[in-house]
Image (cartoon, rainbow, N blue to C red):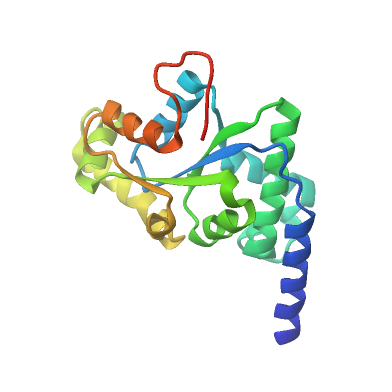
Amino acid sequence: ENIFMKTQQVVNESLADSLDLNAIRFVVGLGGLSECGKSSIGLYLDDKRGINRIKIKHLMEKLELRYGADQFPFEEGIYGIGKEVMTALFSERLSEYFSERGISTAAIESLHNFEFTRNLKLFMGEKLRVVYVDTPREIRILRNSKNFNGDLRESEREVNRKDKIKLSRGAAKIKGIADLVIDNSKSFEKTIDKLEDFLGIWKYQKHTIILS
């Protein structure tokens, strides 16, 4: 076991040193529990600020195709190769994605795996800002009820089901390592104001995005 851990450490350090993240200028990582408002924020940044919205799941599926995760003897698929290695591979694929599309900024969602998020912060350093969207359970259930014709009981079941999965992955713990925790219990406008103030995006600029 000690030999394995030492070998993994050497591999991790080698991967970190060899990563080329020059194409990435700035990444906003969105985390939070089910129906907290992550997607709404991601769509806003994409539509109004030109910050490309990228689904983490999509990039992970691309990695599984590239490395043949179905061949790995792990129940968790490609995540089974180790959180550090997985983080390095994801960072590499993210940088490739930026280069392919000629972009320099993006919002990635959703961060719901604590260990992956913690390692991603270590790998990407100042290029990544993690934003945790904090919304009370009651409000999340109420907002989600529109998908069930206003049925609060059905909405609660769905929120509970999704939360159970995310909580098992440490999603709530991400709040403790986030660069910004946004209270999304009030108006969406107030949420966006807090986000823009934090990111240093100049307000009311229609075409130019200036990031500090």
Q: Is residue 36 visible?
A: yes
Quick one: 127 or 170, which is closer to the camera? 127
Quick one: 200 or 44, which is closer to the camera? 200
User: Would you identify the image quadrant in which residue 23 lies?
Assistant: top right
Q: Is residue 189 above or below residue 86?
A: above
Q: Is residue 135 above or below residue 107?
A: below
80 relative to 100 in the view: left or right: left
Count of number-bearing discs: 0
Q: Residue 149's spot in the image, x, y percent?
A: 24, 27
| Quadrant where the image shows the N terminus | bottom right
Q: Is residue 78 visible?
A: no
Please identify the residue farthest to the front as the structure is shown: 212
Q: Residue at x 76, y 58 (%)?
A: 17
Q: Residue 164's spot in the image, x, y percent?
A: 37, 56
User: Would you identify the image quadrant in which residue 150 lies?
Assistant: top left
Q: Residue at x 27, y 44 (%)?
A: 135
119 relative to 17 in the view: left or right: left
Q: Residue at x 61, y 61 (%)?
A: 76
Q: Residue 104's spot in the image, x, y percent?
A: 64, 31
Q: Residue 117's spot in the image, x, y percent?
A: 53, 55
129 relative to 203 in the view: left or right: right
Quick one: 23 or 85, which is closer to the camera? 23
Q: Residue at x 58, y 59 (%)?
A: 119
Quick one: 65 or 105, which is closer to the camera? 105
Please identify the residue farthest to the top as the structure is shown: 206
